[in-house]
Amino acid sequence: GMTWVEQRVAVRALGHLATYPSTFPAVADHGEVLELAIQLASSSLEIVYSHFYQFVDRRLGYHCDLLTRGMGGAEMESRKAEEWASQLQCWSLQLINCFAFKPEFLHDICKPEFLAKLPGMWGGLVNENSPAGVGLLRTICQSKLGRGHA
């Protein structure tokens, strides 16, 4: 499967495509996209922690190089990994937000355990374009159907 580094790039690209009415249907055609975005938004910080941050000696070389462009040591890698984890969460939320405007996807988004986590998904300062968890809740609450769940 894809590692979190590849998932980050994929989520960013899909989120970009999902923002345009002409390309949204192509993204939405793949049901697993929304499912994956919800999983990533919920657990991106834990994923990056357990697959990279936690064990310095087990870090994949190409991940380290991507994160720091070959400069800086473990501390710099860790700092960048935190930033990238936050981006992964934000870009996942952004992708979900595109789906949230369409009533037919609200049922999949409005799972109680996911909604409960949203207020804590802040996103960080590096991601000023992200709706963050609160922004996604706002989108959900714009429709009567969404308000019924939220």
Image: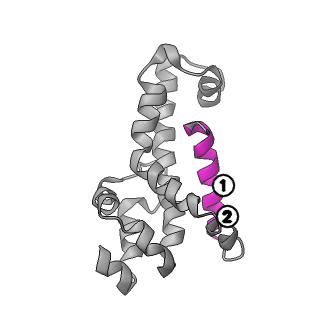
Across and down, in percent, residue 144 comes to 36, 86
Residue 82 to residue 19: above or below: above
Q: Which residues are magenta?
A: 4-19
Q: Residue furthest bottom?
A: 144
Across and down, in percent, residue 96 comes to 50, 64
Element carrying mark 1: helix
Residue name at image x 66 percent, y 55 percent:
13
Residue 106 to residue 45: above or below: below
Mark 2 nearby-residue class (10 Å; few <14, some 14–19, many ≥20): some
- Which disc number belongs to residue 25? none
Instruction: Give the left or right position of residue 85, taking residue 6 as reference.
Output: left
63 within the magenta span: no
Identity, as a three-letter code, of the amino acid under mark 2: Leu
Residue with the mark numbered 2: 17
Residue with the mark numbered 1: 13
Identity, as a three-letter code, of the amino acid under mark 1: Ala
Q: Quadrant of the N terminus?
A: top right
**Residue 98 in which image quadrant:** bottom right
Q: Are marks 1 and 2 in contact (CB under 8 Å)?
A: yes
Residue name at image x 30 percent, y 53 percent:
120
Instruction: Give the left or right position of residue 120, taking residue 64 as reference.
Output: left
Element carrying mark 2: helix
* Visible residue check, residue 129: no
Residue name at image x 48 percent, y 29 percent:
51
**Residue 114 in which image quadrant:** bottom left
